[in-house]
Every structure is written in structure tokens, then in C-alpha cells.
Amino acid sequence: MTIQDSAPPPPPRRVYGRRQNRPLNASRSQAIEELLPRLSLEAECINNAPASLDPKTLFCTPMTRFSLEIGFGSGERMATLLPQNPDIGYLGAEPFINGMAAFLKSIYEEKPDNIRVLMDDAMLLVHALKDECLDDIYILNPDPWPKKRHHKRRIVSQANLDEFARTLKPGGKLIMTTDVPDLAEWMVTQTTLHPSFRWTAKNAQEWKNPPTGWVPTRYETKGAKGAESMVYLLFKRT
């Protein structure tokens, strides 16, 4: 039986909230119109068989590593790292138009070719990717969905962790951050319960402080209503 035969059907799109919260200015509209068609992964996620998309086929030049960021907001981290690491293939998913437009505007002049994006539910991309093709996955400050009845919407779940484990290489990293205590506890509990992940922290300082070379996002600097200190959770795929 092949991977495609055994893979579950594609997940339904699950994007909650408004996809656009304010009109785009001219420069952001231009970035969307000109860059998004060239960088978009929508066709690959829709047309490929499940668990068959090889990120090596997405780039014109060979890449040594592949990194996925889920819900990248305005993309400050990736925009900083793209020119520094031309040999790393970056994949990013951000369903909201304003965040995608801000990111594409920030890279409009350089137009790097080591980035591909999906403006839709990130799990559509994860589901499309082949087994053991990613070196790391970043989930930075996801929506906490604080109401108990909305916990099923949280990106970190056993079903999604199954997919993260499938697409990560052995030893690959799952990096998560949040400044919401309840969500931090949720992410640690869910991920440590999963048999494919091991928490690397040996003491509190390792999850209270950002890793070496960390690129802070706009969200990190402003925080959220009721937020406390940021936590940095690093898990390895066993």
C-alpha cells in the first residue's frame, strides 16, 4: 500500500474569524497582485495527492533544509531570515490577507526565491507534504481560543501532531511560543503526550528565554491582552 493510498482525505478548511480586517493600501495590494501568484502553494495543495508534495520540487535551486512556519502573521521572522539563508527553503502559511500583504510588501524589493506561501489553512499544506521532508516547524503565538468550547480549534492537537510528526524528519524540531499561560500548559501537555515528540528543556531557563539567534516578531514585542511572559517550547521528533 502506498502513502497516497493509506493517507486520510484532505482536512476541511478551518479558518475562523475575518480573512481581512481593513482595506489594503496601494503598495500592499501591489505586493499581493504581483508576488502571491509566483509564490503561492495553493495549486500544489489542491491538486497533489495527499502526502506527496516534495518541497525540493518547489524551488529553482537546490535547498539544504526546509522550514515551515504556521500562521506567520506579518512574517517578520521569515523576512529577516530569507536573505541570510538562501540555501534554506522556507514555507509559510497565513490565512489572513492583511498579514500576507504585509509580509509580501516587506520582501517586495528583494523578491527572494527561497520562500513559498499558502494563504489558507496551514493544515492543507501539512497534509499535502510528503513524509519526513521538513527540518523544522514553527508555531509562534497561535490563537489561544480561550473559551473551553473553542479548544478544539487550537492548532496543537493530537490529530495535527500526528501530521507534524509525519512530515518532520527524525530529529526535526517543533518550535512553539505563546505568552498565554493556559495555552502554554495546553501545548506542553498535548505534545509531551504524543509518542513522537520529546521536550528538550532541561530547566526553566531553557523555555523562559528565547533560543540563540532568535528573531522576535511584532507580536512578541507588544503582547496580548492578559498575556504574561513569553515561553519558548522546543520539541524534537523522536
Image (spheres, helix red, strand yellow):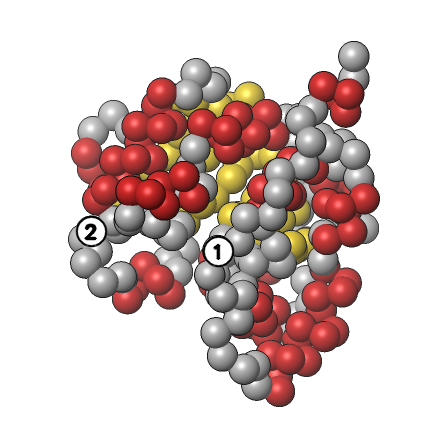
Q: Which residue: 74% across, 74% down?
A: 34
For residue 33, above or below residue 127? below
Disc 2 vs disc 1: Cβ atoms closer than 8 Å?
no
Query: In front: 61, or 102?
Result: 102
Question: Which label is found at residue 229?
Answer: 2
Q: Which residue type does callout 1 highlight? A: Tyr
Residue furthest top as drawn: 1
Q: Which residue is mark 1?
A: 16
Callout 2 crowding tier (Cα within 10 Å): few <14, some 14–19, many ≥20: few
114 with respect to 76 (left or right): right
Residue furthest bottom as drawn: 26
Q: Which residue: 75% across, 37% down?
A: 53
Q: Quadrant of residue 194?
A: top left
Task: Give the position of the N terminus as an image quadrant.
Answer: top right
> Residue 102 location in percent, x, y?
54, 72
Q: Which residue: 56% across, 81% down?
A: 24
Secondary structure of the residue carrying numbered label 1: loop
Query: In front: 15, or 123?
Result: 15
Question: Which label is found at residue 158?
Answer: none
**Looking at the image, can residue 84 be seen?**
no
Secondary structure of the residue carrying numbered label 2: loop
> Residue 207 location in percent, x, y?
26, 38
Q: Which residue type does callout 2 highlight? A: Ser
85 with respect to 48 (left or right): left
> Residue 26 location in percent, x, y?
62, 87
> Residue 3 location in percent, x, y?
74, 21
CA separation in Å, label 2 and label 1: 26 Å
**Looking at the image, can residue 13 be seen?**
yes
